Amino acid sequence: MSDEKYYQRVADELDGNPRKYTDKALWTKAEVLSQGDSEKTRYKYIELRVKKLNAKDIERATKENEQANLKHNLQEKRKEALKLEERIKKRELIEEWVLWSLLIGSFFIARLFGLLGVASIWLGYAAYLKLNKEKNLTMSLLIAITVACISYVCGLILISFGLLSFLSS
């Protein structure tokens, strides 16, 4: 609202019958500031009332801006939450596929490499679960496969030494 409209509004308040919109406390303050002069009191009241109306409109506009900002921030947080939820669902789906692939693969690995192969695959899966939370999918799968292969080779070496020591005794 422009200044002119504030002045018109205050003039209408003062000219109205009865003066139900006149701010009595502000009128008393205007009388004190104008030292009881009735003409000066009217002008001082108009000045004070216009300042008060202007301050109210500024306060109202500030509150509306704050509410708009809060609403915007809330919408942004909701978008972020939806994106996070989507990523979590995608990761869970990938983990489910990895687990099922591992279960099916364990059957074939057990036939080809025995229990040592299955144990090394599950050790690799444990490494995948640990790393999947810290690294991306590709890196965690590669490290898991590496762990499985190394554990299988280490198992073969241990079994070979065990058989050699058993046979030599």
Image: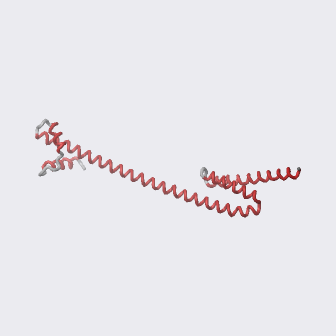
In the image shown, does 4 or 42 lie closer to the viewer? 42
- Asked whether, in this view, residue 117 is left or right of residue 88, the answer is right
Residue placed farthest to the right in the image?
168
List x then y, in percent, for residue 27: 16, 42
Query: What is the basis of the colouring in this image?
Result: secondary structure
List x then y, in percent, for residue 24: 17, 44
List x then y, in percent, for residue 89: 55, 59
- Asked whether, in this view, residue 169 is left or right of residue 17, the answer is right
In the image shown, does 50 or 86 lie closer to the viewer? 86
Above or below residue 26? Residue 106 is below
Q: How many marks?
A: 0
Q: Residue at x 75, y 59 (%)?
A: 115
Residue placed farthest to the top in the image?
35
Q: Residue at x 56, y 59 (%)?
A: 90
Quadrant location of residue 129? bottom right
Q: Residue at x 70, y 52 (%)?
A: 147
- Asked whether, in this view, residue 18 is left or right of residue 129, the answer is left
Quadrant location of residue 137? bottom right
- Asked whether, in this view, residue 86 is left or right of residue 16, the answer is right
In the image shown, does 92 or 135 lie closer to the viewer? 92
